Amino acid sequence: MKKVISKLLILLILIGAILTIRQFNLQEYLSLSYLKENLNQFKELHSQSPLVVISYFMLIYIGATALSLPGATILTLAAGALFGLGQGLLIVSFASTIGATLAFLVSRFILRDYVQNKFSDRLKNINEGIEKEGAFYLFTLRLVPIFPFFVINLVMGLTPIKVVTFFIVSQIGMLLGTAVYINAGLQLSQLNSLKGILSPQIILSFTALGILPFIGKKIIAMLKAKKVYKGYKRPKHYDYNMVVIGGGSAGLVTSYISTAVNAKVALIEKHKMGGDCLNTGCVPSKALIKSAKFVHAQKNSQKYGIKEASCNFDFKEIMGRVSTVIDKIEPHDSIDRYTKLGVDCFKGDAKILSPWEVEVNGKVITTKNITIATGASPFVPPLEGIKDVPVLTSENLWQLEDLPKKLIILGAGPIGLEMAQSFQRLGSQVTVIEMGERILSIEDPEVSEYLLSRLEAEGVTFLLRHKATKINTTHLTIESKNGTKEIPFDKILVAVGRRPNVKGFGLEALNVSLRPNGTIDANEFLQTNYPNIYVCGDVTGPYQLTHTAAHQAWFCAVNALFGRFKKFKVDYSVIPWATYTDPEVATVGKSESALKKEGIAYEVTKYGIDDLDRAIADSSDYGFIKVQTKKGSDKILGATIVGINGSDLLLEFIAAMKHGFGLNAILGTIHPYPTMGEANKYLAGNWKKARKPENVLRYLRVFHRWERKGTPDSKNSLNKVEA
């Protein structure tokens, strides 16, 4: 409240100052004719009291600039005529910068919060650009006089640029333009209008100066590249346009796109084509989930009106089916397929020898560009005794032949939860150990709580806020605030995260930059510190998702092959993800927790799937949909679906966010009945219902009553309706 009052007070002061200037016609004192008529008198005052005149002049100049009054040009001319080139330039340089900074601060204090909240999604990229290169952009604008300085002051106040940066850059950037006006003031008697100061030639010269920073930026980039490439000899000819290291999702898509535009491509994979997703991740886990879901349905046949159903299964055969599924999909990612597409596939260890040379199987091949797509591996924490225990990870889990009676899972993220439910349904007694406050911490708390209750109802045991400290072949020791205890197990699955594969193929020798979390550092174009070495997928992040890796791969291929003409910044604005438990948890965009953290104004709409006809018919009537929309709008900022086939239902919200249509459009779209997809439309209906125009509806009641009974007195009818 105090901040609002302060804003109103400053606004009133500004309005009062401007009205006073207009009321007493003070702007006439900031005209060229007035200055020329009174120049001698000003000079006499200056000779008598130079410090007083300079002080008053600076105060007037600062005030005019801070209020964005159209008089700064005249005052700058006056400074040249009164004080000369050197002293005038010094005085005006500081006065103009101080005034500009005051205007900047006023704009920031009064308007920035409102503008940033109102247009947060549109300003995101601008804010990121200002934070990275705000000084560069401001300096360029200051050099080009076709941009009014007062507009620059006000607009920059709305951005995240630092006050100190604004002051220093403005001081330097306005110096040249100020010198031109000061110099013109020396010949004030010869000026008849302000047009004589800035001729088209001078404006073009300033514009050229404004372009110089961009040219300089290109030169700096070239110098950086020259420095990073120092010591390496560039080949005269290249064997390939692109060499891709890693045959997972990221590497396959990079190779596919590159060869599709007729580039010559080499793909190197040391293990299995298809990477983790095909061999140890997405595909085998979904195959196991399906088998476990079938067993669960048999055990719960009564809810479908079937008194008794039974199924006999051999766990080894279920794992055999998992292998069969992998084998059936494998041709999609095979060497044979990609060779037919035109990619030269190498099976072996790659080693980057230089920015343009890669060794594989003892052969050195040269390439114009390199894409690193080496993925990530399960992280196994350094617990006491863990080296002596054959723990399971997502890599070796699929080699199990016997169902463990007691299974401990470390980690309550997507992998841990999917496997916990599947093994519990197949007959294991599963215990999940999680250090954090809740499961699935990437989601909103209510989502975590709902899924926790569903999994606990199926028999999974959760120990939250517990830390594993020691392990032997039969027991795991865990600690919490209540003390230490041991838990027996037959098998233990470690699912606490993944770390990037960055060692063993030459990155260390090249000094390719890594982030603190161990991922390969890359700019917005997915370039490493070597401009021709690109990176995509889990090895760089920020999302360890198969579809995100494929998304990044497009940018790697296009930027590497055509970057000299046009480069594209990777777009993470609409990234979906899903956890394939039952119910599934599928999310896109910003969660409610994220919106709160970022201070973005939003509204929440929910719909319970227990109300949906198709869900009731299928005895799948559980879960909910939750959508965050921009405050006062139907624009979707984020959506989460907790329910059967939630990942499929999410597609409509993904499309809405990507292509810019909102809940009104979803509400106006015909959805077939009865389907699970109707849930999205009912969610949109709840959003609309919460915003129904009550005043209009009151008058419509009167209208319809009039239609039924004739023409009553409108006023009395309205009063009766309200009563």
Image: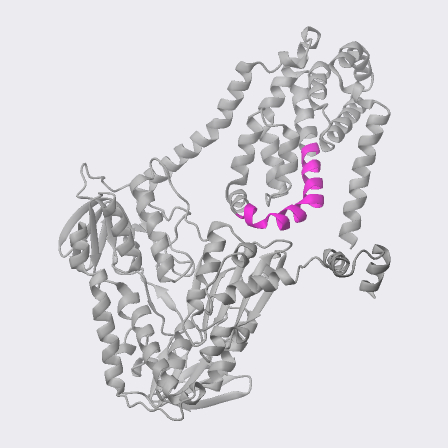
Front residue of 16/176: it is 16
Quick check: 155 left or right of 484?
right
- Above or below, 710 against 206 in this view is below
Is residue 28 within the magenta segment?
no
- Above or below, 653 against 66 in this view is below
- Above or below, 406 against 228 in this view is below
Q: Residue at x 32, y 77 (%)?
A: 288
Whole-percent x, y for residue 171 in the image:
61, 31
Query: Predominant secondary structure in magenta?
Result: helix
Quick check: 17 left or right of 201?
right
**Image quadrant assignment for residue 224:** top left
As drawn, the residue found furthest toward the left would be 362
Quick check: 342 left or right of 606?
left
**Image quadrant assignment for residue 175:** top right
Is residue 102 within the magenta segment?
yes
Q: Residue at x 71, y 37 (%)?
A: 102
Region of the chain picked out in magenta, as a range: 99-124
Whole-percent x, y for residue 72 in the image:
70, 24
